[in-house]
Amino acid sequence: MTTLSETIRPATRSSDWKAIVVLILLIPVLWSPPFVFRFFLYQPFSIPSGSMAPTLMVGDYVFAAKYAYGYGRYSFPFAPSWISGRVLAGEPEHGDIVVFRTPKDTSVDYVKRVVGLPGDRIQMREGQLILNDRPVTRVALSETLAGTACGGDLKVKRWRETLPSGVSYETYDCVANGFLDNTAVFTVPSGHFFVLGDNRDNSTDSRMMSAMGFIPMDNLVGRVTRIFWSLDEDGEPHIERLGKVR
């Protein structure tokens, strides 16, 4: 009579060899330039909404640098849920445009601008960003037609906002005295950051504590660095928008 151990040994040995063969065959794929680029360096994303207009518009396709803040649970597809923390971890800077997952819904990627880091106090007063009790510098620009980013073809206000770090960008002010133009003071807790959309009246962001709130550093996916392709509202290439993002 064949013993149980004798029955198992050949099967185990066979499966081990199969695994080794599969790994050997996968080596060229795992170290191929497209695989390394997509999984370790840059991940492409499409912009589905106008919450970051005018910096990022619907129809823009961007690269996010995955290495910018280290690698964690949300850096790779199908990563197991028990992974925590990040390898080669780094923190974002004020003004960075980041891709992340929220604690409320970890199945969806979001893109917003970082305006608050641990210990910062954030508030909106009459539509102006207040950072650590000081109004962030902003300069009025000429009004523009924002299209679907503001829900129609009406002219909207634009501002040039400049953070103390020197990062400067445009924002849309679609509605005077909007729902999120005046807020309480938010103090960013340790290990988290605070985000806003550049389209201040049409963005679900950290101002909405029940919907998004503070974002854990471990939920970072990457930093948006470049628009590599863009289509306008008619589906035509929008070459003027290609380039670095800030």
Image (cartoon, rainbow, N blue to C red):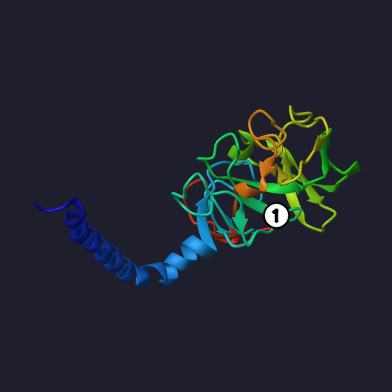
Q: Residue furthest right?
A: 134
Q: Quadrant of the C terminus?
A: bottom right
Q: Position of residue 115 (x, y in %)?
A: 76, 47
149 on left or right of 196: left
| Rendered residue at 62%/36% (across/down) | 153
Total marks placed: 1
Image coordinates for residue 79, horizontal then vertical, percent: 47, 50
182 vs 23, left or right, is right
Q: Residues within 10 Å of mark 1 (few under 14, many from 20)?
A: some
Tag 1: residue type? Asp
| Coordinates of residue 26 in the picture (x, y in percent) | 33, 67
Classify residue 125 by image quadrant.
top right
Q: Evaluate whether residue 56 shows in this view.
A: no
Q: Residue at x 60, y 40 (%)?
A: 102
Image side of residue 48 versus residue 33, left or right:
right
Task: Describe the element under mark 1 as helix, strand or loop.
Answer: loop
For the point 50% across and 40% down, the residue is: 107
> Mark 1 — residue?
96
Residue at image coords 44%, 49%: 78
Residue 218 in picture, x, y percent from top left: 62, 49
Looking at the image, residue 155 lies above or below residue 20: above
